[in-house]
Amino acid sequence: MTETPLIGGAVQAPVDTRLAGARIGVVTFPGTLDDRDASRAVRLSGATAVDLWHADTVLADVDAVIIPGGFSYGDYLRAGAISRFAPLMAKIIDAANSDAKLPVLGICNGFQILTEAHLLPGSMIKNDHLKFLCRDQVLRVENNTTAWTNAYAAGQDITVVLKNQDGQYIADEKTLDALEAEGRVAFRYVGHNPNGSRRDIAGISNAAGNVVGLMPHPEHAVETGYGPAHTGTDGLGFFNSVLNTLLGDK
Amino acid sequence: MPRIVVDVMLKPEILDPQGKAIVGALPRLGFTAFPSVRQGKRFELFVDGEVTEEILAQAREAAETMLSNPVIEDVVNIEVVAD
């Protein structure tokens, strides 16, 4: 499928059949609103985006899964709390924990769902200032060896969009110390901490590195003329990383 | 209809931003006796007929697995209200 540039000037890369053979599932829950952007980011990276519905009971032979942002089930109970029990989540949890180590990326509400599903430790509560916040945010890549970060340089600063209300990452001190010791802090906020997250943590990974969750939105920073400051494409690295992982380039 | 009441609070060590906002607003209305406020959640699980031990056990399990997140919250009270 070819993409029409949102703003003139973007050039469609020729279809690379090796990349297009990678099937990246994007899950939609009731209330998900960034699924289209995530699918578009997948296609811009050259892979094939596969729509998945929360009530599905099969993973449709996908090679990786993205759980995008939004407000699944209205976040009525806690952010991600009800989605965590959706039929498809049971399949994703099993596949992520299996020997095959299905790569799973949770963005924003997707990150919240992954913590509720216990694929990632800790939890998110309301921003310390209580306000919804939307802005360009600089992140530091702390671990570039995961399935979703290997296209970045270690210590690289990237700018992507941040937009959330329940973005304050919390965990007990023991868990935080373990995350730091095991190199599982994948991203940290640079400059002002936007939500009170412990130790400026913006994103983390599981021990195997196949599951990554973060609050900011790389899928909104994949196209020139459209991302942060209208130029940024720093988010593409996530989607290129998982292709490296799937195609064995890293 | 009898119901099982479940009260959930953020763990004491976790800062409650909502309670903090409320405690800041109370003095403006003249309520000056409350130096601290914490906001929690109350669930009412309605039951058809008698609340048996089995149903109460279900409520306890629901409270621990879905109604609360043990990483950040405690179930502080479960009680049967018959009316």
Image: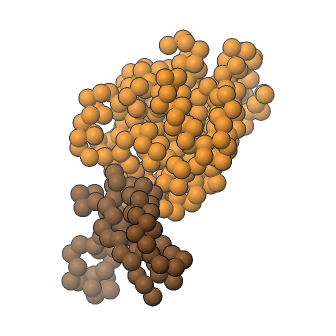
Tell me, by letter, which chain the rendering colours brown.
B
Seen as rendered, the residue at the extreme top is A249
Q: How is the image coloured?
A: by chain
| Residue B60 vs residue A152, the one in the foreground | B60
Q: Residue at x 28, y 73 (%)?
A: B37
User: Residue A129, percent across and down?
Assistant: 37, 59
Q: In the displayed structure, would residue B50 be above or below residue A57? A: below
The number of numbered discs placed on residues in the rendered structure image is: 0
The percent position of residue B59, horizontal first and vertical second, equals 43, 65
Q: Is residue A102 left or right of residue A32?
A: left
In the displayed structure, A28 sits above or below B22; it is above
Compared to residue A147, the image places residue A226 above or below, namely below
Instruction: Place residue A219 in its image quadrant.
Output: top right
Where's residue A182, x and y in %?
30, 27
The residue positioned 28% from the left and 87% from the top of the image is B30
On screen, residue A164 versus residue A202, left or right, reads right
Indicate the quadrant containing the N terminus of chain A: top left, top right, bottom left or bottom right.
top right
**A173, A151: nearer the viewer:** A173
- The quadrant holding residue A143 is top left
Of all chains in the rendering, the one displayed in orange is A
Would residue A239 be visible to someone looking at this image? yes
The residue sitting at 59% across, 28% down in the picture is A64
